[in-house]
Image: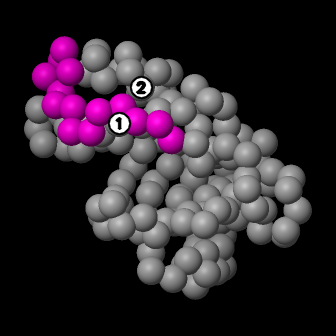
């Protein structure tokens, strides 16, 4: 049911400094940006690191897994002894939810039911997506 890792969410205080660091040190490429987050692309996959300033998301690093349909997935996982910690909610690209497996591990799941994210602001100032598959 889990299709792949979509992104790793990392909360930062200084978006500009963190973006510069992750691009220069780790070789990631800015893929999209908005007021509160920036997607950084890996060179050999469409998974991303998403730097964000959202205070309602825990400061721990979270991995977000792509599923075909969040609503169906939460029902299926709940029937398999997972606890739904955060019911499905809307995000820019579709829906997201947070579940916990029977061993206490939190998993963030999301779908792309609204389609891939189109950057509101590209790093070069143009409105062209850097990656055709950019998500957030």
Query: Magenta stretch: residue 5 in it?
Result: no
Of the two numbered discs 2 and 1 on the same chain, state the one appearing first in sequence: 2
* In the displayed structure image, the side of residue 96 where residue 56 appears, left or right: left
* Residue labelled with disc 2: 70
Q: Quadrant of residue 85?
A: top left
Question: How far is disc 2 from disc 1 in space, using C-alphas?
Answer: 7 Å
The residue beneath circle 1 is 97
The dominant secondary structure in magenta is strand
Q: Which mark is residue 129?
A: none
Specify whether 121 is left or right of 82: right
CB atoms at circles 2 and 1 under 8 Å apart? Answer: yes
**Nearer to me, 113 or 39:** 113
Q: If the image is split into quadrants, where does the N terminus sit?
A: top left
Instruction: Tell me the SS state at disc 2.
Output: helix
Q: Is residue 68 left or right of residue 59?
A: right
Quarter residue 65 falls in: top left
Q: Position of residue 36 (x, y in %)?
A: 54, 66
Q: Position of residue 4 (x, y in %)?
A: 49, 34
Task: Please determine whether, in this image, residue 124 is positioned above or below residue 90.
Answer: below
Residue 74: x and y in percent read 31, 23
- Would you place residue 77 above or below residue 37 in this image? above
User: Is 1 placed above or below 51 here?
Assistant: above
Q: Which residues are magenta?
A: 78-91
Q: Kindly tell me whether residue 109 is visible in this rendering.
A: no
Tell me which residue sits at (45%, 80%) in the image: 13
Viewer-nearest residue: 121 or 132:
121
Query: Residue, x 18% and y 27% (percent of image)?
Result: 82
């Amino acid at each position: 049911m889990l299709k792949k890792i979509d992104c790793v969410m990392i909360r930062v205080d200084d978006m500009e400094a963190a973006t510069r660091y992750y691009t220069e040190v780790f070789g990631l490429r800015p893929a999209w940006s908005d007021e509160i987050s920036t997607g950084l692309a890996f060179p050999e996959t469409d998974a991303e690191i998403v730097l964000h300033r959202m205070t309602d998301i825990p400061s721990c690093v979270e991995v977000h897994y792509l599923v075909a349909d969040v609503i169906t997935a939460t029902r299926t996982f709940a029937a398999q002894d997972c606890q739904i910690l955060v019911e499905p909610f809307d995000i820019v690209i579709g829906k997201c939810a947070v579940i916990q497996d029977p061993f206490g591990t939190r998993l963030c799941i999301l779908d792309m039911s609204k389609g891939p994210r189109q950057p509101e602001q590209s790093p070069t100032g143009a409105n062209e997506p850097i990656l055709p598959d950019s998500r957030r």
